Image (cartoon, rainbow, N blue to C red):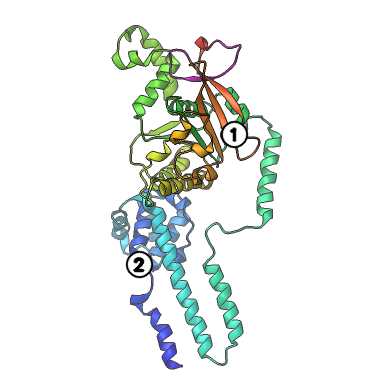
């Protein structure tokens, strides 16, 4: 029995204990650099192996993201008599250099959580082994305790909650909206028919916009983003294909009624300068951020959106477009598209953001009315999306594009609206037979 006990307890030798002090330091450094990160993670101080790092993390939690910085952290630890114990101000400063990039904070958290769970399991196994060796111990009670504690150790983040929790959330939502009822309860895009059909883009849901080449998917997506921003809803556009300047140029052209040719060439701009400035000022007031780098990954995007949600209260984002995201995953494009779709949907749900994602079609969808089966990539794309709509050029009128729904999360699919290309300018308007499109305004 002694030999067995020695074999089991040998796992607690210092060199064999699962730990990653490097990840602990990197996470603490990330929090110092970007304090909002502390609101996005859920590990407890006890998950840290290093006692000094436990102390620092506890102090960070007590300070909170709004007031946390290197100076405040040092002062709080000093008042508690802990600053010298953890290595002084020099150790805190060194944590910043221990963080290669703040965008990997979730990875650091995952490693810390994993090693903590492994240490906990080893400890429980030692306790159970000790109970098995001690014949005076009730072994059945010891097994029951160990199983219960192991289940607790394996409980996932965001584990199941009683139905009453969600009923309470529903009650509060309905009560709040009953006090201020409105037909458009989502994020208004400014396109009347679209908002009527969808009640606005919904936070927590992914809307896929696909369509035939040349129908204006990017143009429509950015216009909808500007519409949401005009209605007071801040958001972000990840433009992986087009430059940010090109995007705003087209929108300024639509607002000012100055053709993009003149904006690009400068021809006749002197006599149009007042119109340009008025449109420029309207755009400048919109709460929109634009990222036009071509190498965004979904992990980087999640971190960036978490930051902007904290700092700017963003409520929506646009991805232009899905297939250009730079994640390296899977052996082929099919596996990669399935992964991307799952990650983007997770961002919408976890961060409570409305996601408008532009998706390409396979060749079969170019010359017929597109359906979900015509989305490029994995079939997982159509399963994870909450809403899917397609843009299709009208067969008779060049300035008419049909927006056709093929999937909605709640309500009836197979709905259609007409979009009119505003003559002479890069913009769309809802089709209304009694409206003059030459009078287009934002």
- The image shows residue 26, relative to residue 436, as above or below, that is below
Which numbered circle lies on residue 85?
Answer: 2
1 or 2: mark nearer the eye: 1
* Residue under the image location 38 percent in, 56 percent down: 27
Q: Which residue is mark 1?
A: 186
Q: On the rendered structure, is 333 left or right of 351?
A: left
Residue occupying the point 41% across, 33% down = 289
Q: Position of residue 293 (x, y in %)?
A: 33, 37
Distance from the alpha carbon under mark 1 to that under mark 2: 51 Å
Q: Main secondary structure of the magenta part?
A: loop
Q: Is residue 346 magenta?
A: no
The answer to which quarter of the image holds residue 298 is: top left
User: Vertical placement of 62 versus 349: above or below?
Assistant: below
What span is colored magenta in the figure? Answer: 423-436
Q: How many marks?
A: 2
Q: Nearer the viewer, residue 286 or 150?
A: 150
């Amino acid at each position: 029995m002694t030999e067995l006990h020695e074999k089991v307890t040998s796992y607690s030798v210092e060199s064999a204990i699962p730990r990653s002090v490097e990840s602990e330091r990197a996470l603490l450094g990330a929090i110092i650099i970007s304090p909002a990160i502390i609101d996005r993670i859920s590990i407890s101080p006890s998950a840290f192996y290093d006692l000094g790092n436990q102390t620092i993390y506890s102090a960070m939690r007590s300070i909170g993201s709004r007031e946390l910085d290197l100076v405040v952290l040092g002062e709080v630890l000093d008042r508690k008599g802990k600053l010298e114990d953890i290595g002084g101000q020099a150790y805190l400063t060194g944590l910043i250099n221990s963080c290669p990039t703040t965008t990997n904070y979730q990875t650091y958290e995952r490693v810390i959580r994993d090693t903590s769970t492994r240490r906990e399991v080893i400890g429980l196994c030692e306790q159970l082994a000790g109970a098995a060796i001690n014949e005076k111990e009730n072994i059945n009670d010891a097994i029951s305790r160990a199983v219960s504690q192991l289940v607790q150790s394996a409980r996932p983040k965001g584990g199941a909650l009683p139905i009453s929790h969600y009923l309470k959330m529903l009650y509060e939502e309905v009560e709040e909206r009953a006090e201020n009822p409105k037909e458009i309860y989502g994020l208004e895009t400014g396109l009347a028919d679209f908002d009527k059909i969808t009640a606005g883009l919904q936070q927590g849901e992914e809307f896929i916009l696909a369509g035939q080449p040349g129908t204006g998917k990017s143009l429509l997506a950015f216009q909808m983003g500007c519409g949401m921003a005009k209605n007071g809803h801040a958001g972000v556009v990840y433009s992986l294909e087009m430059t940010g300047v090109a995007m705003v140029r087209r929108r300024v052209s639509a607002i000012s009624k100055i053709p993009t040719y003149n904006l690009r060439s400068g021809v006749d701009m002197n006599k149009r300068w007042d119109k340009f400035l008025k449109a420029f000022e309207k755009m400048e007031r919109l709460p929109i951020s634009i990222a036009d780098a071509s190498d965004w990954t979904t992990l980087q995007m999640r971190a960036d959106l978490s930051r902007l949600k904290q700092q700017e209260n963003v409520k929506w984002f646009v991805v232009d477009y899905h297939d250009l995201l730079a994640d390296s995953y899977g052996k082929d494009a099919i596996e990669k598209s399935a992964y991307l779709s799952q990650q983007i949907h997770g961002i919408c749900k976890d961060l409570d953001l409305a996601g408008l994602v532009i998706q390409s079609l396979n060749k079969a969808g170019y010359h017929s009315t597109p359906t979900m089966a015509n989305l490029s990539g994995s079939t997982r794309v159509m399963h994870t999306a909450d809403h899917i709509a397609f843009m299709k050029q009208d067969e008779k009128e060049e300035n008419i594009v049909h927006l056709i729904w093929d999937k909605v999360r709640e309500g009836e699919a197979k709905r259609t609206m007409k979009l009119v290309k505003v003559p002479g300018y890069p913009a769309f308007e809802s089709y209304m037979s009694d409206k003059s499109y030459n009078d287009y305004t934002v």
